Image (cartoon, rainbow, N blue to C red):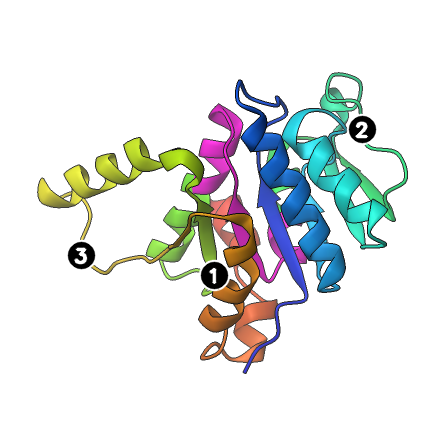
Amino acid sequence: MAEIRSICVYCGSSPGNDPIYVEAALAFGEALARERIKLVYGGGGIGMMGALADAALAGGGEVTGIIPDFLVAREKALEGARAVIVTNDMHERKRTMFELADAFVALPGGIGTLEELVEQMTWIQLGQHRKPLLLLNLKGFWDPLIALLKHQQQEGFIRKGSFQYLLADQPEQIIPMLREAARDIPEDQLRNGVAKAVAEEM
């Protein structure tokens, strides 16, 4: 049984219009610290990203932020994290996040969050890794995406069973679901992947 030691979290650099989004980020950050699971995230200190990291740090958790140079000022790179890695570009950022994570979680967010999430779906579909992927479907936030994926499958553009993801309704469900998903994944497959090669080929 593989152990989840670090989770890469994708989420908005904005707080959203409903306080429930930031509340969920705070709750999940607290849970990561409580369970001694390292947070790997985009490195920003604002919006949901900032709330998530602040909560993890406040609980004594380990946080690694990964942010490209051009976003350091715009997203106010978090201070106080154990490690803040500044990359040259977005591709390096995403590759580093992948390499440091045992699993991936998408909280609500915007285009950047969607892009990162869909990239992981693509890599799973192509057989590039088996790390668990989970969407926090708070208030049905991801329902439109799920409907699109089903439509693509119905129209013959996605093969049934070609990739899998988990859905949670509340933050407290995330870690137990990821741990359950990791039960049958060999340790070396959880720690490793060939994302670097994929990124270089694209």
Q: Residue 53: where, in percent of width, then height?
A: 75, 41
The residue to which callout 2 is attached is 77
Residue ID at (41%, 35%) = 139
- In this view, 46 is above or below 11: above
Q: Quadrant of residue 118?
A: top left
From this viewpoint, is residue 129 visible?
yes
Residue ID at (83%, 46%) = 57
The residue tagged with tag 2: helix, strand or loop?
Answer: loop
Proximity of marks 2 and 1: CB atoms separated by less than 8 Å? no
Query: Farthest residue in the bottom direction?
Result: 1
Number of residues whose C-alpha sits closer than 10 Å to that of mark 1, classed few (under 14), some (14–19) or many (20 or more): many
Camera-nearest residue between 201 and 45: 45
- Position of 16 with respect to 128 (left or right) is right
- Residue stretch rendered in magenta on the structure: 96-117
Camera-nearest residue between 149 and 22: 22
Number of residues whose C-alpha sits closer than 10 Å to that of mark 2, classed few (under 14), some (14–19) or many (20 or more): many
The residue to which callout 1 is attached is 132
The residue to which callout 3 is attached is 160
The residue tagged with tag 3: helix, strand or loop?
Answer: loop
Q: Is residue 105 magenta?
A: yes
Proximity of marks 3 and 2: CB atoms separated by less than 8 Å? no
Q: Earlier in the sequence, mark 3 or mark 2?
A: 2
Q: Residue 161: where, in percent of width, then height?
A: 23, 60
The kind of residue tagged 3 is: Lys
- In this view, 9 is above or below 182: above
Query: Farthest residue in the right direction?
Result: 80
Locate the C terminus and report the quarter of the image it occupies: top left
The kind of residue tagged 2 is: Ala
